[in-house]
Image (tube, rainbow, N blue to C red):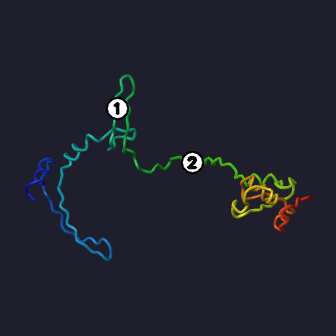
Amino acid sequence: MEGGCTEKARRHYGMRDLAVQPTLPVQHSPSRPSVNGVIGLRVPRAVITAKTAPYLRHTPHGPRTCFEARTERPGRKPLVARFGGIPLKRQKRAVLDDRLPVPAATRRKELVTRLLKGRCEWCQQRDPVQVHQVRKLADLGKPGPAQPGWASLMARMRRKTLIVCAPCHQLVHDGKPAAICTP
């Protein structure tokens, strides 16, 4: 280990000793015990200080190790971007100001709006309403004279649902196609 890359590294960093740390048994898991040996280089404190000095910046929180990118601008303050350098110690008197989330402005669904009107879409009476629903619009066929009135209305609106009062709903299910509800 005296020649090659190790010697070059020792000279570059001003290191005095090449130390081989003792082999210690380290058990990673109960089923896989292993033994690790690590080669370490002892670096003098002065060398570490000299090598880290270019990265030590004076931030608003004091001297910190961080990366700072600075762009000088003539006649204006320089643009500064700092990555890191934030103290991670706990602030016991910190005030947390959590704002309430703004609820999303969602429109009501069309069906809910039609239900809240409280009006039968077939006979236009204001009574308690119910919803009549078909499986598919294709089940209704095309609007025309051969269809019952409620099916023709649903086909014209292109909706699978029809808001109807209880008497009209009963007429639809009784199969009286031409019946007009008169409560």
Disc sitting over residue 71 in the figure: 1
Q: Locate the C terminus by quadrant.
A: bottom right
Label 2 sits on a secondary structure element that is: loop
Residue at coordinates 80% horizontally, 61% vertically from top-left? Answer: 130
Residue 145 rendering spot, x and y as whole percentages = 80, 56
Residue 63 rendering spot, x and y as whole percentages = 33, 41
- Judged by depth in the image, the label closer to the viewer, 2 or 1, is 1
Name the foreground residue: 97 vs 101: 101
Name the foreground residue: 98 vs 62: 98
Numbered circles on residues, count: 2
Residue at coordinates 70% horizontally, 51% vertically from top-left? Answer: 108
Q: Counting residues from the N terminus, which is met first, the one under dot 2 or under dot 1?
A: 1
Name the foreground residue: 172 vs 119: 172
Q: Is residue 113 above or below residue 62?
A: below
For disc 1, the neighbor class at 10 Å (few under 14, some 14 to 19, many from 20) is few
Q: Residue furthest bottom?
A: 31
Label 1 sits on a secondary structure element that is: strand
Cα separation, mark 2 vs mark 1, equals 34 Å
The amino acid on which the numbered mark 1 sits, given as a three-letter code, is: Thr
The amino acid on which the numbered mark 2 sits, given as a three-letter code, is: Asp
Q: For this view, does 111 lie left or right of residue 3?
A: right
Name the foreground residue: 116 vs 114: 114
For disc 2, the neighbor class at 10 Å (few under 14, some 14 to 19, many from 20) is few
Residue 120: which quarter of the image?
bottom right
Residue at coordinates 17% horizontally, 61% vertically from top-left? Answer: 39
Residue 102 rendering spot, x and y as whole percentages = 62, 47
Q: Is residue 72 above or below residue 162?
A: above
Residue 26: which quarter of the image?
bottom left
Residue 3: which quarter of the image?
bottom left
Q: Residue furthest right?
A: 183
Q: Locate the N terminus by quadrant.
A: bottom left
Per the image, the residue denoted by label 2 is 98
